[in-house]
Image (cartoon, rainbow, N blue to C red):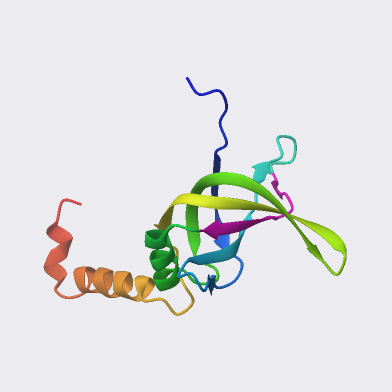
Amino acid sequence: MAGSVNKVILLGNLGRDPELKTFEGGGAVISFPLATTESYRNRETGEKVVLPTDWHSVTVRKSGLIKIVEAYLKKGDRVYVEGKIRYRSYEKDGVTRYITEVVADDLTLLGGQREGGSGDRSAESTSQGASGGDSGSDDLPF
């Protein structure tokens, strides 16, 4: 059994397009902010209560994942991320700054709809084609 575990699981939406940085040695890293928002239903009033949005800095260092993120993810897309929390510090203008980030080990693209996406249109055209037409479709048992 492991002595300790550092694992983060997030499901959220990209706050902006991923930003790719390349290094002289040939390495690369891509990063993006991920928004997560929790909600619950108030037992007394039945109202949905939405908690404030949390923002997470996600960094991808694996070359295979970098290619996927660069090719497919855009602002607003929904994604499932698994990774580790890392804390870093650096000095800028004599001030020490601290960063908390999630270093992604794995991610799954969740097919959310983009503005103007074709997902809705193809579903509409399929359902219209199936329901439109002759009146003999009333004889169907479903």
Residue depicted at x 50% and y 59%: 60
Q: Is residue 2 left or right of residue 126?
A: right
Tell me the chief SS of the magenta region: strand
Q: Position of residue 131 (x, y in %)?
A: 23, 69
Q: Is residue 53 left or right of residue 115?
A: right
Q: Is residue 26 magenta?
A: no
Residue depicted at x 44% and y 53%: 107
Q: Is residue 52 magenta?
A: yes
Q: Position of residue 61 (x, y in %)?
A: 49, 58
Q: Is residue 93 left or right of residue 32?
A: right
Camera-side residue: 108 or 28?
A: 28
Mark count: 0
Residue depicted at x 37% and y 60%: 64
* Residue 133 found in image quarter: bottom left
Outermost residue on the front side: it is 25
Q: Is residue 10 left or right of residue 47?
A: left
Q: Position of residue 4 (x, y in %)?
A: 57, 27
Camera-side residue: 21 or 27?
A: 27
Give the magenta-colored segment's residue range.
Answer: 47-60
Give above or below for 130 relative to 104: below
Camera-side residue: 24 or 39?
A: 24
* Residue 35 found in image quarter: bottom right
Residue depicted at x 39% and y 67%: 67
Q: Position of residue 87 (x, y in %)?
A: 69, 48
Give above or below for 106 relative to 74: above
